[in-house]
Image (cartoon, rainbow, N blue to C red):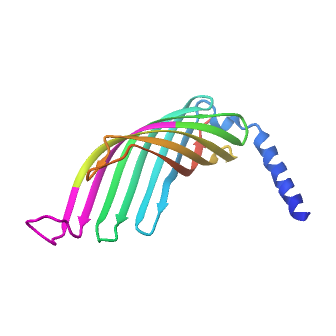
Amino acid sequence: MTKLFYITLSFFIISLLSLTDSLAQTQKGRFMLGTSMGKFNFGKNYTELSLDVKAGYFIIDNLAIGLTPSYAYTSADYPNGDKQKNNAVGIGPFVRYYFGEGKLKPLLNASFLYYNSSVKAFYASIPVPEFPGDAYEFQFKNKYKLIQAGGGIAYFVNDNISLEGIVNYGRYLDYESFGYEKDGELSISLGVQFFVGK
Protein backbone atom coordinates (compact mmCIF):
# COMPACT_ATOMS: atom_id res chain seq x y z
CA MET A 1 0.00 0.00 0.00
CA THR A 2 2.85 2.36 0.88
CA LYS A 3 4.57 1.63 -2.45
CA LEU A 4 1.37 2.36 -4.34
CA PHE A 5 1.00 5.65 -2.46
CA TYR A 6 4.50 6.83 -3.37
CA ILE A 7 4.11 5.77 -7.00
CA THR A 8 0.81 7.65 -7.23
CA LEU A 9 2.30 10.72 -5.53
CA SER A 10 5.31 10.70 -7.86
CA PHE A 11 3.08 10.43 -10.91
CA PHE A 12 0.93 13.32 -9.61
CA ILE A 13 3.97 15.57 -9.05
CA ILE A 14 5.39 14.80 -12.51
CA SER A 15 2.00 15.55 -14.06
CA LEU A 16 1.84 18.92 -12.30
CA LEU A 17 5.36 19.77 -13.44
CA SER A 18 4.51 18.89 -17.02
CA LEU A 19 1.58 21.30 -16.97
CA THR A 20 3.69 24.20 -15.79
CA ASP A 21 4.04 26.95 -18.39
CA SER A 22 7.56 26.70 -19.82
CA LEU A 23 7.35 28.36 -23.23
CA ALA A 24 10.15 30.75 -22.21
CA GLN A 25 12.64 27.89 -22.53
CA THR A 26 12.16 27.62 -26.30
CA GLN A 27 10.93 31.06 -27.24
CA LYS A 28 12.09 33.08 -30.23
CA GLY A 29 15.48 34.71 -29.76
CA ARG A 30 17.00 32.14 -27.40
CA PHE A 31 20.08 30.03 -28.07
CA MET A 32 20.59 26.33 -27.39
CA LEU A 33 23.89 24.51 -26.89
CA GLY A 34 24.27 20.91 -25.86
CA THR A 35 25.55 17.43 -26.52
CA SER A 36 24.22 13.90 -26.94
CA MET A 37 25.61 10.39 -27.20
CA GLY A 38 24.14 7.65 -29.33
CA LYS A 39 24.66 4.28 -31.04
CA PHE A 40 25.49 2.61 -27.74
CA ASN A 41 26.83 -0.72 -28.92
CA PHE A 42 29.45 -2.23 -26.62
CA GLY A 43 30.00 -5.90 -27.32
CA LYS A 44 32.84 -8.26 -26.54
CA ASN A 45 34.42 -7.74 -29.96
CA TYR A 46 32.56 -4.71 -31.27
CA THR A 47 32.21 -1.09 -30.16
CA GLU A 48 30.17 1.70 -31.73
CA LEU A 49 29.27 5.14 -30.39
CA SER A 50 28.70 8.70 -31.54
CA LEU A 51 28.96 12.12 -29.92
CA ASP A 52 27.06 15.12 -31.29
CA VAL A 53 27.12 18.78 -30.29
CA LYS A 54 24.27 21.11 -31.16
CA ALA A 55 24.44 24.91 -31.40
CA GLY A 56 21.16 26.49 -32.46
CA TYR A 57 18.97 29.58 -32.46
CA PHE A 58 15.18 29.80 -32.12
CA ILE A 59 13.93 31.67 -35.18
CA ILE A 60 10.35 31.41 -33.88
CA ASP A 61 8.85 29.97 -30.70
CA ASN A 62 9.76 26.26 -30.40
CA LEU A 63 11.63 26.10 -33.76
CA ALA A 64 15.44 26.08 -33.71
CA ILE A 65 17.98 25.80 -36.52
CA GLY A 66 21.74 25.44 -36.19
CA LEU A 67 24.87 23.36 -36.73
CA THR A 68 25.84 19.92 -35.42
CA PRO A 69 29.53 18.96 -35.15
CA SER A 70 29.72 15.17 -34.79
CA TYR A 71 32.17 12.37 -34.00
CA ALA A 72 31.57 8.68 -34.70
CA TYR A 73 33.73 5.70 -33.73
CA THR A 74 33.52 2.00 -34.54
CA SER A 75 35.91 -0.82 -33.68
CA ALA A 76 35.70 -4.53 -34.45
CA ASP A 77 37.95 -7.43 -33.40
CA TYR A 78 37.27 -10.73 -35.11
CA PRO A 79 38.06 -14.24 -33.78
CA ASN A 80 40.55 -14.87 -36.62
CA GLY A 81 42.67 -11.87 -35.54
CA ASP A 82 41.33 -9.36 -38.07
CA LYS A 83 40.66 -5.83 -36.77
CA GLN A 84 38.95 -2.70 -38.08
CA LYS A 85 38.67 0.83 -36.70
CA ASN A 86 36.82 3.81 -38.09
CA ASN A 87 37.08 7.40 -36.79
CA ALA A 88 34.79 9.95 -38.45
CA VAL A 89 34.34 13.68 -37.90
CA GLY A 90 31.39 15.51 -39.41
CA ILE A 91 29.35 18.69 -39.41
CA GLY A 92 26.05 19.83 -40.86
CA PRO A 93 22.81 21.74 -40.32
CA PHE A 94 19.93 20.65 -38.11
CA VAL A 95 16.37 21.75 -37.45
CA ARG A 96 14.36 20.99 -34.31
CA TYR A 97 10.79 21.65 -33.21
CA TYR A 98 9.39 21.38 -29.66
CA PHE A 99 5.71 20.79 -28.94
CA GLY A 100 3.74 22.14 -25.98
CA GLU A 101 4.46 24.52 -23.16
CA GLY A 102 5.16 22.16 -20.26
CA LYS A 103 8.30 20.78 -18.69
CA LEU A 104 7.86 17.61 -20.74
CA LYS A 105 8.03 18.50 -24.42
CA PRO A 106 7.86 16.09 -27.36
CA LEU A 107 10.23 17.09 -30.16
CA LEU A 108 11.09 16.38 -33.78
CA ASN A 109 14.65 16.63 -35.04
CA ALA A 110 16.34 16.37 -38.45
CA SER A 111 19.92 16.83 -39.63
CA PHE A 112 22.16 16.45 -42.69
CA LEU A 113 25.79 15.67 -41.83
CA TYR A 114 28.96 15.54 -43.93
CA TYR A 115 31.63 13.16 -42.59
CA ASN A 116 35.34 12.66 -43.21
CA SER A 117 36.42 9.25 -41.95
CA SER A 118 39.72 7.49 -41.44
CA VAL A 119 39.53 3.70 -41.67
CA LYS A 120 42.22 1.27 -40.52
CA ALA A 121 42.08 -2.49 -40.99
CA PHE A 122 44.48 -5.25 -40.00
CA TYR A 123 44.05 -8.67 -41.55
CA ALA A 124 45.91 -11.41 -39.70
CA SER A 125 45.91 -13.68 -42.71
CA ILE A 126 44.69 -13.07 -46.24
CA PRO A 127 44.70 -15.94 -48.77
CA VAL A 128 46.95 -14.31 -51.36
CA PRO A 129 48.81 -16.95 -53.42
CA GLU A 130 51.98 -14.82 -53.74
CA PHE A 131 52.26 -14.22 -49.99
CA PRO A 132 50.66 -17.12 -48.08
CA GLY A 133 50.14 -16.55 -44.36
CA ASP A 134 51.23 -12.90 -44.40
CA ALA A 135 49.41 -10.17 -42.45
CA TYR A 136 48.24 -6.99 -44.14
CA GLU A 137 47.38 -3.54 -42.81
CA PHE A 138 45.27 -1.12 -44.83
CA GLN A 139 44.29 2.49 -44.28
CA PHE A 140 42.24 4.89 -46.31
CA LYS A 141 40.09 8.00 -45.96
CA ASN A 142 36.48 8.24 -46.99
CA LYS A 143 33.76 10.86 -47.23
CA TYR A 144 30.09 10.16 -46.74
CA LYS A 145 26.82 11.84 -45.77
CA LEU A 146 24.18 10.98 -43.18
CA ILE A 147 20.56 12.13 -43.26
CA GLN A 148 18.81 11.73 -39.89
CA ALA A 149 15.25 12.28 -38.73
CA GLY A 150 13.64 11.34 -35.47
CA GLY A 151 11.59 12.24 -32.47
CA GLY A 152 11.74 12.07 -28.73
CA ILE A 153 11.02 13.90 -25.54
CA ALA A 154 12.79 16.57 -23.51
CA TYR A 155 12.39 17.15 -19.79
CA PHE A 156 13.16 20.74 -18.77
CA VAL A 157 14.80 20.80 -15.35
CA ASN A 158 14.45 24.60 -15.42
CA ASP A 159 14.41 27.41 -17.98
CA ASN A 160 18.04 26.74 -18.93
CA ILE A 161 18.57 22.96 -18.88
CA SER A 162 16.81 20.00 -20.49
CA LEU A 163 17.44 16.25 -20.55
CA GLU A 164 16.41 14.40 -23.70
CA GLY A 165 15.98 11.01 -25.27
CA ILE A 166 15.58 10.66 -29.05
CA VAL A 167 15.04 7.80 -31.50
CA ASN A 168 16.56 8.53 -34.92
CA TYR A 169 16.48 6.87 -38.30
CA GLY A 170 19.61 7.55 -40.33
CA ARG A 171 20.20 7.05 -44.03
CA TYR A 172 23.82 6.83 -45.24
CA LEU A 173 24.97 8.15 -48.61
CA ASP A 174 28.29 7.12 -50.21
CA TYR A 175 29.35 5.09 -47.14
CA GLU A 176 31.87 2.34 -47.83
CA SER A 177 34.42 0.58 -45.64
CA PHE A 178 36.49 -2.10 -47.38
CA GLY A 179 33.58 -3.12 -49.56
CA TYR A 180 31.02 -2.88 -46.75
CA GLU A 181 28.20 -0.44 -47.45
CA LYS A 182 25.73 1.02 -44.96
CA ASP A 183 22.19 1.93 -45.92
CA GLY A 184 19.99 2.88 -42.97
CA GLU A 185 19.78 2.25 -39.24
CA LEU A 186 17.82 3.10 -36.12
CA SER A 187 19.65 4.60 -33.14
CA ILE A 188 18.89 5.99 -29.71
CA SER A 189 20.60 9.07 -28.27
CA LEU A 190 20.61 10.60 -24.79
CA GLY A 191 21.66 14.18 -24.19
CA VAL A 192 21.54 17.44 -22.31
CA GLN A 193 20.81 20.89 -23.77
CA PHE A 194 21.45 24.36 -22.32
CA PHE A 195 19.31 27.38 -23.21
CA VAL A 196 20.40 31.00 -22.87
CA GLY A 197 19.18 34.38 -23.97
CA LYS A 198 16.13 36.50 -23.32
In this view, the residue in front, 21 or 77, is 77
Q: Is residue 85 magenta?
A: no
Horizontal side of residue 147 vs 106, given as left or right: left
Q: Quadrant of the C terminus?
A: top right
State the image coordinates of residue 102 (x, y, percent, origin top left).
73, 39
Range of magenta residues: 110-139
Task: List the single residue furthest toward the right.
Answer: 1
In this view, the residue in front, 160 or 95, is 95
State the image coordinates of residue 118 (x, y, percent, origin top left).
28, 54
Residue at the (26%, 61%) spot, across then down: 121
Within the image, what quadrant is residue 170 found in? top left
Residue at the (44%, 69%) spot, across then down: 44
Residue at the (24%, 50%) spot, across then down: 141
In this view, the residue in front, 189 or 134, is 134
In this rendering, the answer to whether 112 lies above or below 179 is above
Horizontal side of residue 3 vs 141, given as left or right: right
Task: List the single residue furthest toward the left.
Answer: 130
State the image coordinates of residue 42 (x, y, percent, origin top left).
47, 64
Q: Quadrant of the N terminus?
A: bottom right
State the image coordinates of residue 73 (x, y, percent, origin top left).
39, 57
Residue at the (46%, 53%) spot, across then down: 51
**Majority secondary structure of magenta residues:** strand
Q: Is residue 129 magenta?
A: yes
Task: List the single residue furthest toward the top.
Answer: 60
In this rendering, the answer to whether 22 lies above or below 72 is above
